[in-house]
Image (cartoon, helix red, strand yellow):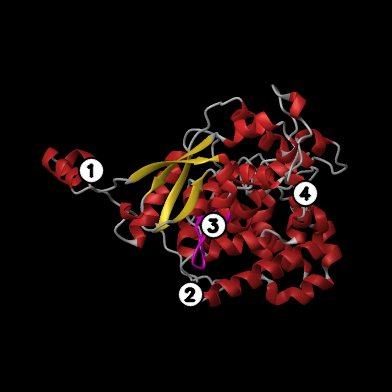
Amino acid sequence: MSKNSYLLPGEKFVIESKFDRPQSSFTDREINDKYKRGEIRIVTEQARYPLDTIETMLDSRQGDKQKYILNPEYQRRKRWNNTRKSRLIESFIMNVPIPPIFLYEVDYSIYEVMDGQQRLTAIYDFYQGKFELKGLEYWRELNGRNYDNLPEQVKRGIDRRYLSSIVLLAETAKSQEEAESLKRIVFERLNSGGEKLTPQETRNALHNGKFNQLCMELAKNDNFRKMWQLPLESEVEDLLVKSEEELKKEKQPNILTRLASYRKMEDVELVLRFFAYRNLKDLKSPIDEFLNEYLKQANSWSDRVLSDLESIFKETIDLVYLVFGDEAFLPPSRLIESKTPRKSVYDPLMQVFSRNLDKKDRIIQNAEKISQERYLKEDLLYPGKDRSLFDARYNDRKDVESRIEYFQKFLQQCIK
């Protein structure tokens, strides 16, 4: 059993110090030898695909395998709406240069799409007639038309355009481990220029695995999403493809902000934080590196450990919602004017409730008292400091430990 009684056997997380050889200690000869050995060298080829072949290309198979894999490992939630898809088609009409897509040859003639999924999907949907052109800026006379009812000359003009690709060949890597490492390098470099990825989007792409998939699944929990004021999973598909103008007409408050949080995968990071903070004693700044390392290690844990962790999260989130409802993660209003959920409340409250699941019945019996009195105490100031204990600007390990101590003492008093 772990030092902390609330940790599971097999829930092993270790932060190790890593020391690299100083860069200045390498000789020119060693560096030249490394270059000649071909270390960290990408083998590529280029290809061009006529637009009218992409529909067939994405549907093609080799034996029982899809030839072009629109891999969810790299899938972000920044789904293109029909206006953005339409403007890509408009760019082809105008012959505007389009950046190449990047493919990784996972097996001979089997390709994984690393960058360019939205472009490929937009072209595929256009040829399938799944949307009508809208929001065009320079060819407004085509708004409302789909591929089939375009003027013949325009249709032919689109058909003769190409989408370029850069293919990372299978011989780039000598082992599966090296392949994963090189894919990470390429993915990071591809996404270092344009729209900056959030830390969680990067984790999702570079450290995908069983535990990452579990975090994504748990983030769909309706009670969790209500407490974080996020769109429910059942609403997301329709919301993602709507334009900003259409979203503003929605009757849901703050829908643009809420959807932006979803697109950035902030919900998945919150689930990851809950599990990582079970090892709070190992938390060191910066928090993003701590979460990265935790996710990498947790991906290798056994199915039994992951199943038990799943149960702990579900039971904890449902218990917190039962007691506090939608306002579970709001800070004390008499000290902080905010109607927005805070990590400074979420992190300690979830930890305390998860550590007291064995007292679930007594918590439910005293739910009304716990809900009404959690912020009535006088010691809501940080010990020895003239600031709120739940001030979100302060979130290092000692701050979280102080908040956990506050909630733990309060809960014990309520369920005596």
For the residue carrying disc 2, how many other residues have a C-alpha within 10 Å: few (<14), some (14-19), or many (20+)? some
Which of the two discs, 2 and 1, labels the residue nearer the N terminus? 2
Which of the two discs, 4 and 2, labels the residue nearer the N terminus? 2
Residue pointed to by mark 2: 10
Which residue occupies the foreground of this view, 236 or 11?
Answer: 236
Amino acid, disc 2: Gly
Helix, strand or loop under label 2: loop
- What is the quadrant of the C terminus in the image? bottom right
Q: CA distance from mark 4 to mark 1?
A: 52 Å
The structure residue drawn at horizontal position 75% and vertical position 66%, both measured from the top left corner, is 318
As drawn, which residue projects farthest toward the right? 251
Q: Which mark is nearer the camera, 4 or 2? A: 4
Residue pointed to by mark 3: 60
Amino acid, disc 3: Ser
Q: Which mark is nearer the camera, 3 or 4? A: 3
As drawn, which residue projects farthest toward the front? 152
Q: Is residue 161 above or below residue 17?
A: above
Q: Please report the bounds of the magenta region as a residue range.
A: 59-70
Q: CA distance from mark 4 to mark 2?
A: 40 Å
